[in-house]
Image: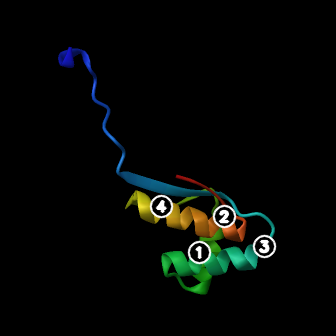
Amino acid sequence: KEDDVIKVEEKTIFTVKMTDFGSSKLNVIKTVRTILDLGLKEAKDFVESVPAIVKKDIPEAEAIKIKNAFFITGICALI
């Protein structure tokens, strides 16, 4: 019966959280500056505040793009 089927909503909005940045702090700061459009001091402060939410309520494609950019730099992130 169709009445017995429970519909599950597909998630369309995501949050990216940076959990660790490894050993290359300078490259991490550069990547964070680019993604978040921050100044040097703000990006450094953000990186030093890990774990932190990078972006909230964004589409899946953008979240994956950020996570991939972080992965290349050695940053651990969760979506």
Query: Pointer 3: residues within 10 angstroms few (<14), some, or many (20+)?
Result: few
Tag 4 or tag 2, which sits nearer the N-term? 4
Q: Above or below — where is 22 with respect to 25?
A: above
Of marks 1 and 2, the one in the foreground:
2
Examine the rendering and report whether any part of residue 66 can be seen: yes
> Are discs 1 and 4 less than 8 Å apart at CB?
no
What's the residue at 78%, 73% (across, down)?
Answer: 24
Task: Please name the amino acid that badge 2 sits on.
Answer: Phe
- Say what secondary structure mark 1 lies in: helix
Q: How many marks?
A: 4
- Tell me the quarter of the image containing the N terminus: top left
Which residue position holds label 2? 71
Which residue position holds label 3? 24
Point out residue 28 in the picture as x, y percentages from the top left corner: 68, 74
Point out residue 26 in the picture as x, y percentages from the top left corner: 74, 79
Query: Pointer 4: residues within 10 angstroms few (<14), some, or many (20+)?
Result: many
Depth check: give the residue in front, 45 or 23. Answer: 23
Cα distance between the residues tagged 2 and 4: 12 Å
Query: Pointer 2: residues within 10 angstroms few (<14), some, or many (20+)?
Result: few
Tag 1 or tag 3, which sits nearer the N-term? 3
Cα distance between the residues tagged 3 and 1: 12 Å
Task: Please name the amino acid that badge 4 sits on.
Answer: Ala
Which residue position holds label 4? 63
Of marks 1 and 4, the one in the foreground:
4
Q: Give the quadrant of residue 70.
A: bottom right
Of marks 3 and 4, the one in the foreground:
4
Task: Please name the amino acid that badge 3 sits on.
Answer: Ser
